[in-house]
Amino acid sequence: MIKYIIKRTLGLIPVFFGITLISFFVIHLAPGKPTDIQTSLNPKVSYEARLRMEKLYGLDKPIHTRYIEWLKRFVKFDFGRSYVDSRPVSEKILERIPVTLLINVSSLILILAVGIPLGILSAVRRNSFMDRATTVFAFVGFSVPEFWLALLLMSLFGISLGWLPVSGIKSLDFEYFSLFGKILDVARHIILPVSIGAFGSIAGISRYMRSSMVGIINQDFIRALRARGLKETDIVYKHALKNAILPVITILGLSVPGLIGGSVIFESIFAIPGMGRLFFESVMARDYSTIMGILSIGAILTLLGNLLADIAYSYADPRIRCGF
Amino acid sequence: MKYFFKNRLALIGFIFITIILAFALFAPKIATHNPAAIDTKSILSGPSNSHILGTDTLGRDIFSRIVYGSRISLSIGFIAVGISVGIGIFFGSIAGYYGGKIDSIIMRFIDICLCFPTFFLILAVIALVEPSIFNIMAIIGLTSWMGIARLIRAEILTLKERDFISASRIMGARGSWIILRHLIPNAIGPVLVSATLGMGGAILIESSLSFLGIGVQPPTPSWGNILMDGKSTLGVAWWLTVFPGIFILLTVLAYNLLGEALRDLLEPRIVANERIESK
Amino acid sequence: MSVLKVNDLRVHFRASAGMVKAVDGVAFEIEKGECLGLVGESGSGKTLTALSIMKLIPENAKIAAGEILFHDINLLALPNDHMRGIRGSKIALVFQESGVSLDPVFTIGHQMTEALFTHRRLVNRKEAKEIALEYLNRVHIPDPLKTFYDYPHQLSGGAKQRVGIAISLLNSPELLILDEPTTALDVTIQAQILDLLDEIIERHDISVLFISHDFGIIARMADRVAVMRNGKIVEMGMKNEILSNPKDPYTVNLLESVKALSWR
């Protein structure tokens, strides 16, 4: 298993470089420079001043030099300074990451807690009403525009019913709450974005889990287990389940980028101060360095997510853990 | 049984898509009003006889905007999917056919591309090149070809084992062009499925972008940007939010149902609900 | 005194072409300590017969008629949980390929002790482990303790088959059904497994239903022989009788093909 993990980690290094390369070139291929906001829109700025500003931001050097320099700083997580407010990008990201992580991890937990049992039950009671209802739910889950769902639920729970707050991550009088009160307050604020963000993935995971289970139950060794006289519940919920859940672990890893990307929408709608919202604001302001920083961090997080899923899988599947 | 159930739904999906296509093609005949007609007297009025689905913040008829919006949303979807299928077939067939180093490089490239949260990438590029309709189509296409590439590669790899060997023996190794002529048509099945499902995805992405304000720019109506004002008018004008959203939902759902039905149809070897014993 | 008595068994299953009568009026008896060899080509209905005895036929098949009497109990009329008590304890089945009859994600030891706990009242896991190791010994597994903690993919084909046999014996079955137990193995391993089976059968005095398409193997292992073709038994009798004096033309054919291969 260790060998497997090392091999996978080493394999990720070229991917990592590829990520930095692509994000670098993508941003720099675009027309328009970050200084445009400050310069072209301001007729008072002279041509020389513009050149000076570009030099300040290092925009005058050839592209490959800029890449190498950027790479050197990347590994130190130094993404330069924001073009908007000159604060270090890493600082800006750092203060936003915990929130985004909190929401995404909570989403993942929700996906696991709801999606997997749903898939199992659908498989066990194939073609029952419950199964068909879940299938319908899954299809709708794939098809619904998440931001729309967010708006609707926001208006239902936040405005009409007034049960949940609709913006931000803490209430105004957060500081006065007890520890438990603080936790509860944050929970109330994030429950909507977390649930909605998880919605589509729950649909996906439950379908996948279902087909995985059905595939396993049809295999020969299940019949052999029955021939041993084992209880049906043991066969399904112990043997079949343990086999069927393995590929689902990999799929979970693959849903990480979707969650991270989706956070842009939710954080904007719910006015949550997270990384996604920062990304959106940076994009609007053409804040190069922050954009690249967040893009890269996003990709790194995805990479980590996949690696973790791989490790979990290699541990769970004895065929890999105790290899040939 | 279950198959019939799915079939019926797929039929419904197909019918719905046809309706929406009709909306797009015959928009001027179907729409009740000029979608750009501003009518300050009936701002934010609810569904009524004159405005079936109500009006928006500028008094424009929502139904007409939705009908005209279908043109935009659908065409963006088609072209984006077309681009992604084109790129996907290109890379996938090269990787599958030539194998070896080229294959590894392309697969590695795909892995890298998949690491980026798609939405992040799209946002970054779109906002930097100004959101024209063509740019949106191109970007969505450029970020969704990976799945198709893998599919094509897999198909070609399997087909390569089977036919290539005998074919190259029979015809003398004029393999490449002939094989491409054989391989691509055979691999069309999963590609069709991906393309159909991809339509749904493209529509979702476009509407998300338009909703955020960096997709289709008003006054050109797209289902996403009709919803843009939804957030601020939630309490007052629910129809502004509900109706366009329902159209998006139903259209994407229709494509998904159709795609799944196609998948069941074209890939029977994967469906394994019943095991047949013969001893 | 018969352990198993099958009367007019009919099993139908739904294939894409229509309803197939896979087992069409099969009847036989097995006495205590006797080994009945069921021989026939693939598709003759042998395995389905075996699965019917265990009531483990696939979803798209059904038992259309007949009786299966195990010590005068009609298994076909038995409710499911009683049947479960019989499977794996009183009647045990060894599959063709033990590779696919073992759960790949649980250790051998776990699967064996699980089978023990299902049917016996044991004191604790230690006792179960000891019994499992004992049986691994009986099937001549070289290093029982290591195998106990191994996963199926870590064993060779022959070893897996031995494990399969061990599991089937764990709860002292009265009837052992062997469905092509050596077909998937190399010839040398085949011989070893057959020797093992000889030993086991003699030692435990079990009644055996031995299914194979290989007449040579049947000739070696069985006391009585039943020849199956297209879902029916075309000839049945004492082994020596059948071998020396086959009456049905199909049996004659089968015997000819064996002689041509000159097995053993």
Image (cartoon, rainbow, N blue to C red):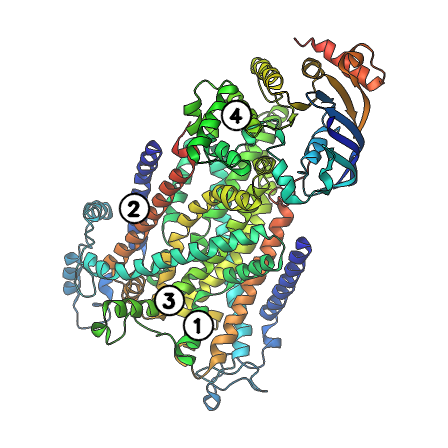
The quarter of the picture where residue C10 lies is: top right
Number of residues whose C-alpha sits closer than 10 Å to that of mark 2, classed few (under 14), some (14–19) or many (20 or more): some
Residue B122 visible in image: no
SS of the residue at dot 4? Answer: helix
Tag 2: residue type? Leu
Tag in front: 3 or 1:
3
Gap in Å between the C-alphas at discs 3 and 1?
A: 11 Å
Residue B77: percent from left, percent from top: 51, 60
Label number found at residue A191: 3
| Residue underneath mark 4 | C163
User: Would residue C7 appear left or right of B180 to someone viewing this image?
Assistant: right
Identify the subunit bearing mark 1: A
Gap in Å between the C-alphas at discs 3 and 4?
A: 51 Å
Tag 1: residue type? Leu
Residue A264: percent from left, percent from top: 35, 63
Q: Are marks 2 and 3 in contact (CB under 8 Å)?
A: no
| Residue underneath mark 2 | A21
Q: Are marks 3 and 1 on the same chain?
A: yes
Identify the subunit bearing mark 2: A
Q: Nearer the viewer, residue C89 or B125?
A: C89
Gap in Å between the C-alphas at discs 4 and 1?
A: 57 Å
Residue B264: percent from left, percent from top: 62, 49
Gap in Å between the C-alphas at discs 1 and 2?
A: 40 Å
SS of the residue at dot 1? Answer: helix
Identify the subunit bearing mark 3: A
Quadrant occupied by the C terminus of chain B: top right
SS of the residue at dot 3? Answer: helix
| Residue underneath mark 1 | A153
Tag in front: 2 or 4:
4
Tag 3: residue type? Ile
